[in-house]
Amino acid sequence: MKHRRTRMAVGAACAALAALLLALWFGAAIGETAIPFEVVAKTAANRLFGTGYPLDPIDEGIVWSYRLSRVVVAACCGAALSLSGVVLQSLLRNPLADPYVLGISAGASTGAVSVAILGFGGGMIGLPLGAFAGAIIAFVLVSLLAMRAGRGSAAIILAGIAGSQLFHALTSFVVTKAANAEQARGIMFWLLGNLSGVRWPDVTLALPVAIVGLVICLGQARALDAFAFGKESAASLGIPVRRVTVILIATTAMMTAVMVSLVGSIGFVGLVIPHATRMLVGVRHGVLLPAAAIVGAIFMIAADVLSRILITGQVLPIGVVTALFGAPAFALIMSQRRASL
């Protein structure tokens, strides 16, 4: 029986990774200019293994310099936001918790915009670090407000909405006050989620952060299982509640901040994907965390492809696409949960 379960787990993991690779392949091939799947595979082989397949330089350049880097960052972003949603929902025991709702994304946006426009740190602080500082400040502020309002499940969500609106207002104020017209247009489009400017140097930041975040979260999977019964129960099981909470909050803030600094603020991924994945694999975090990361990565790749092809000759902000599909999906999930109660 044990060996059978192991084989099933290995098979499921291989199938999930194959689905992710297939999504990356499709994401690199589909766009305004259709490129054959064979060209995508040969381009990757040429660049990674030096195989020397003869290819059109234009097609090879589009695939390698533009589309592959874009879909890899999209996958990292989807995985990181989904992981953050799973962790926050488990820690706070609230199904509505995610980086966007709790104001973490808004705080990261304010931090990144402050560095980019106001020059905080005198050039010594990069966008990811500024976004991380903004994310931490936002979460601390929301937590203090929630503690002040009460310990109910709704308090943290209401505090998150208030904090999110505050940081959105601060971002708009900074842009309006200090940015020129060109900067303002670029930042407002970026805030809606934009992968157009992503290149391979961004992959070298996004990919390690997503992998490290997944490893840290998996290392705390047992603690997250215990948090499902409350912090007191977790403490009675020997879980160092305060230390685990700090580690996981810092990890979610790091992942959210880096992704926001690269692609802007994107909603619904960290909210919808954890719920959908729980319906597929259950609530055990040892399985839920990697499954949510893969499902989130595939969802973001699909959203990126749609953002490129929905309107001919124009690229939609990816945050618009995730909201268009995420909001109805979340409504459906919530209605099904209500019907099952």
Image (tube, helix red, strand yellow):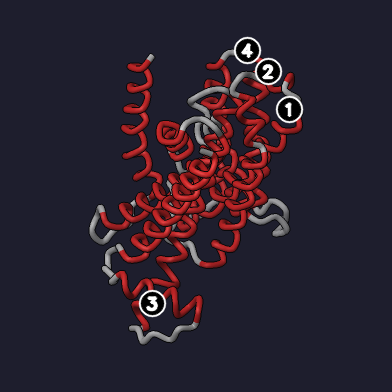
Give the side of residue 285 with respect to residue 234, left or right. left
Neighbor class of circle 1 (other Cα within 10 Å; few <14, some 14-19, many 20+) is: some
Residue 200 position (above or below residue 315): below
Q: Amino acid at mark 3?
A: Lys
Which residue corresponds to mark 2? 233
Neighbor class of circle 3 (other Cα within 10 Å; few <14, some 14-19, many 20+) is: some
Give the side of residue 228 with respect to residue 53, left or right. right
- Could you tell me which residue is drawn at 50 percent across and 66 percent down? 199
Q: Amino acid at mark 4?
A: Gly
* Residues under numbered marks 3 and 4 in contact, where contact means CB atoms less than 8 Å apart: no
Judged from this view, the residue extending furthest toward the front is 1
Nearer-N-terminus badge (3/4): 3
Neighbor class of circle 2 (other Cα within 10 Å; few <14, some 14-19, many 20+) is: some
The one of 82 and 116 positioned closer to us in this rendering: 82
Q: CA distance from mark 2 to mark 1?
A: 9 Å
Q: Which mark is residue 239?
A: 1
Nearer-N-terminus badge (2/3): 3
Q: Which mark is residue 150?
A: 4
